[in-house]
Image: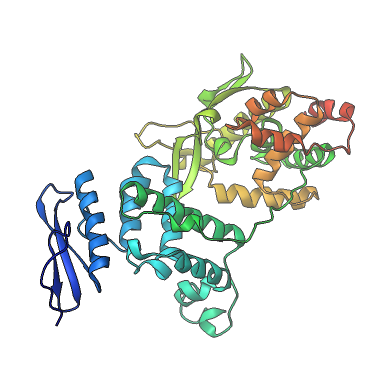
Amino acid sequence: MVVVTRRHNGEGSIYPNRNGFAAYAWITTLAGRRQRKYVYGKTREVVHTRWVQLTREAARGPVVTKVPTVGQFLQRWLDETVAPNLAPLTHATYESHVRHYIEPALGGVRLDRLRVSDVQSWLNRLPTICQCCAQGKDARRADGKARCCAAGKCCHSNPSPRTVKDVRAVLRSALSAAMRDELVERNVAELVTTPKQRKRKVVPWTSEEARRFLESARSDADGLYAAYVLVLVLGMRKGEVLGLRWGAVDFDHRELIVDHQLQRVRRQLLYRETKTEASDDSLPLPDIACTALRLRISQQESARERAREAWRVFEDPQGEPVDLVFTGRYGTPIDPRTFNRAFTARCDLAEVRHLTVHDARRTCATLLVDLDVHPRVIMRILRHADQGVTMKIYAKASSDKTREALRRLGDSLD
């Protein structure tokens, strides 16, 4: 037992206990109650340092009496910070990263005891962990249908470098919120080292490839032909195309208003505002776009006549009917994943290189660059919030086709 005859000056309520020393200070909790909070240590000097720190915290304002674990804080952060303030798709993505990657590895660690080495070791291991095995994806298949991990044949579905980067970004954002709440003194996720990610270089379509793609869709009377035109000629995003209303199309003034999008979030289609304020804008309708949209009117009317009583009108979250431009055979919205599959199938039919819908949007930017359109004008058409994004595209202008051929692009496609 440690015996102490007298306290040092300024030590206050430091006293010996069976494990060394202890001290307490009066604090105000987050609930507004006055109570004691204790600190412990092996030596008097350690306890004195912790007691001084606690006293300073108590002087600044309310003090947290119980530090949560990483998992407990992340759940509160998702519910109280992310869900009310960010887009539903962003919340769903963050929640998925927390549930699948962060919580299993770091969830049980007390938040203020999370170290840089803990995060570094976890990020180093993450690319080597098969997520089919870790999440039991194959084990959840119907009886007798297991074909990889559950059957002892690992499929090596390891996280990509992009996924690792995104998961770390989620943890870093959460720890920044913990610093604002004064639960931690530093953001350990900012101090780790991660491999430099090499971005995939995408070569946009040439004007000839774009022409073949659209001509294939038009000749086959594809119901999504007009959607493809809006992506390639106006550079609209997939969600913006699928969320386009007839009320936003003005044939008289030959312009189109972009103000809503359709997203798939947790097996549900959401009709909501566009990505950013810069995304909302009115775009001029060239001849090919007007022709394609008028063709879409006749296609939709034919589908409505065939469906008859089975036709359904889509409603927004407030219950108001929305006259979508692109609908299925019974008037229902087109799922973004269905649009992706249709776009890939059309690439095969047109015998052009496979591009994603987002990469096809870059084709529009490159064609505008080759037509000597000013970067500020391209920025407005593509509705980028940062001109730096536009300038990266501007620097990658294609040089295979002549400018004169590109100027005839609209006529050849119409």
* Residue 266 visible to the viewer: no
Residue closest to the eye, 342 or 178: 178
Residue found at x 61% / y 18%: 251
Residue found at x 73% / y 42%: 220
Location of the N terminus by quadrant is: bottom left
Name the spot of residue 203 as percent of width and height, x first. Answer: 78, 46
Image height of 353 relative to 377, above or below: below
Q: In which quarter of the image is residue 48?
A: bottom left
Q: In this view, does 364 lie to the left or right of 160?
A: right
Image height of 405 relative to 327, above or below: above
Residue furthest top as drawn:
253
Name the spot of residue 184 as percent of width and height, x first. Answer: 34, 55
Q: Which colour scheme is used?
A: rainbow
Q: In this view, does 111 lie to the left or right of 146?
A: left
Residue closest to the eye, 109 or 15: 15
Q: In this view, does 70 lie to the left or right of 25?
A: right
Name the spot of residue 371 as percent of width and height, x first. Answer: 81, 26
Residue closest to the eye, 44 or 85: 44
Residue found at x 37% / y 48%: 177
Residue found at x 10% / y 50%: 33
Location of the C terminus by quadrant is: top right
* Residue 112 visible to the viewer: yes
Q: How many marks?
A: 0
Name the spot of residue 79 as percent of width and height, x first. Answer: 32, 50
